[in-house]
Amino acid sequence: MEIVPIVDTGLGNSSYLIDLGEGRGLVIDAERDPTPYLAAAEARNLRLRWAVETHLHADFVSGGRELAAGGAQLLAPKASDLAFDHFGLSDGDEVDLGGLTLRTIATPGHTPEHCSYLLTDGPNPLALFSGGTLIAGGVARTDLITPELTEELARAAYRSIHDVLLALPDTLPVYPTHGAGSFCSTAASGERTTTIGRERAANQLLQAVDEDDFVARLLGEYGSFPSYFLRLRDVNRSGPKVYGTEPPALTALSPGQVAGLMSGDAEVVDARPIGKFAAGHIPGSISIAFGESFASWLGWLVEPDREIVFVADSGQDLADIVRQALKVGYERFAGYLEGGIPAWIADDRSVEQLPVVAPMDIPDGAPIVDVRQQNEWDAGHVPDALHVELGKVAEYTDRLPVDAVVHCSHGQRAMTAASLMQRAGLSGIAVSSAGAADIISNRANATP
């Protein structure tokens, strides 16, 4: 038996391909694009026989239906109430995998329907696939359904962990879905996998003296999360559209067509590196530089019912951009600007700029806007800076200053925020090329 992690660092999640022997494969918590699972299976001469879900995912569109379309049997918690073909599992149900067995363990907490799965060889436990109930260094959050259920689910998580999972052997390997970098996670370590014993000894949430202490600690870890989380559970329950290994091709659009679409409320998402966006971009477009976090910020900042026009650099793969958008539930693609910004300029259309400034070039007295997450701000920030998380910038543009310098850690989130501020009519906006520590250090060195 071999367990192959397939990690999405942008979403902070892990899926797992299990080579069960004799050409049989099983996938746990697949994301929408089936390509990495099919490639890993082909490399091992496996047929994917089963696709298993631990819960209704809020942070990505599940790929279970994609793999089922290719011949896998889809297994999911019965309480997920999926509206398409699958086999529902309840606490204690077992699935014969042809020598090994997959045992269902109801572990509500992260979600009400959540199940973990224990892989066994006869009486011997081999691995636990814990989804979000127990993760390396933490526990997945319980506030993604509705505020009314947040504490109730936190208490359920305590009981799932202490009454059920910690009864398993300390040496048992644990393979969580959520991990570091996931907005679903709280207090996650940098590890992707763990053991029951390691979590018993080192997981700070598990050091709580009782259930009330655990709940207080867990709820105290919560930060903000992307708005698209609130709709993807329903997408996964009703059944996402199946695309296969080839994402839909984008339509090439002329500058005139893009301008027409913008007048009809289409969203222009500029996926180019921030330096290119800074030098010249379509007025009203939003900068979301293509990279690991592209899907998360797209899902957080763009309304799902708006058509999207993409602006890409000449070296960027449009198919990869589409895959990233699909995995968080975006499917209304108007197309892409053919020829990019050079074509836009050649068509005698105006562009805007957003200057990038080094810490030593920030004007004295310029307002500083910090768009990092709350935990980053708490760890250290520029004195007198204004803090607005990137996910909330669009809501607060009427309270933000003109002539401000926006910063994050490396410039990408700051450029996204600056594009939203510029679109809202704020003038004189610039982006810092460095983060809080460098700005503070430069100010200290410049002090007479």
Image: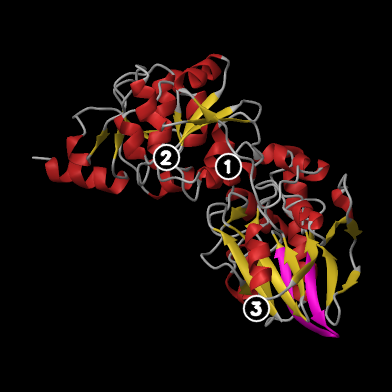
In the displayed structure, would residue 390 be above or below residue 192?
above
* Circles 2 and 3: CB atoms closer than 8 Å: no
Measured in 3D between alpha carbons, the distance from the residue under mark 2 to the one under mark 3, in whole angstroms, is: 38 Å
Number of on-image labels: 3
Q: Earlier in the sequence, mark 1 or mark 3?
A: 3
Q: Earlier in the sequence, mark 2 or mark 3?
A: 3
* Circles 2 and 1: CB atoms closer than 8 Å: no
Q: Which residues are magenta?
A: 116-130
In the displayed structure, would residue 340 be above or below residue 398?
below
Give the residue type that dot 2 points to: Arg
Q: Residue at x 31, y 34 (%)?
A: 431
Tell me if residue 407 can be seen. no
Q: Residue at x 85, y 85 (%)?
A: 123
Dot 2 corresponds to which residue? 413
- Find numbered disc 3 in the image and state the secondary structure of the residue it sits on: helix
* Image disc number at residue 147: none
Tell me if residue 81 can be seen. yes
Q: Magenta: predominant secondary structure element?
A: strand
Question: Residue 196 placed where, x, y %?
Answer: 67, 75
Dot 3 corresponds to which residue? 197
